[in-house]
Image (cartoon, helix red, strand yellow):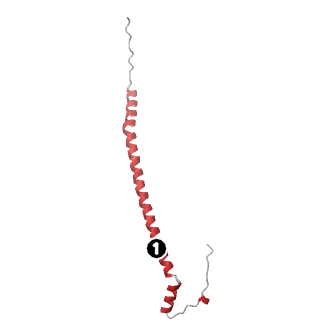
Amino acid sequence: MRSKKVKRIKILKGDKFMIFIVVLFGFIIMPASWVYTKALLSESDIKLARIKNKIDNQKDANEALSMQIDELASIENIQNIASENGLSYNNNNIKNIKSSN
């Protein structure tokens, strides 16, 4: 029987370096960049939630102010202020102006 000679493949320095780079990229750099990306995404989500909360608060404040404007501009309030200042309310002297928006 003949014994088979097994050829050994020689790994060159450049090949070792390339294997090292692939292992480094696959096992260290990729997971680290994935975690970093997820952290940035979470931070962006938190900022977005804060901005949405500020928008909701501002909408509530605007709605409250709008209701206050409607209250102050009511006919009854105008008549009360006019009578307190010695003025009379005459409906014939009132003209409506509509905006063209």
Q: Which residue is mark 1?
A: 64
Q: Give the farthest residue toward the front.
A: 76
Q: Residue at x 40, y 56 (%)?
A: 46
Residue 45, x across and y down, in percent: 42, 54
Tally of marks: 1
Q: Residue at x 58, y 91 (%)?
A: 90
Left or right: 92 in relation to 69: right
Q: Residue at x 40, y 50 (%)?
A: 40
Near-viewer residue (76 or 13) = 76
Helix, strand or loop at label 1? It is helix
Near-viewer residue (89 or 5) = 89
Q: Residue at x 40, y 43 (%)?
A: 34
> Please, is residue 94 above or below residue 18 in the view?
below
**Tag 1: residue type?**
Ala
Residue 63, x across and y down, in percent: 48, 72
> Please, is residue 51 above or below residue 99 in the view?
above
Residue 13, quarter of picture = top left
Near-viewer residue (47 or 84) = 84
Q: Give the farthest residue toward the bottom.
A: 86
| Crowd around label 1: few <14 · some 14–19 · many ≥20 (10 Å) | few
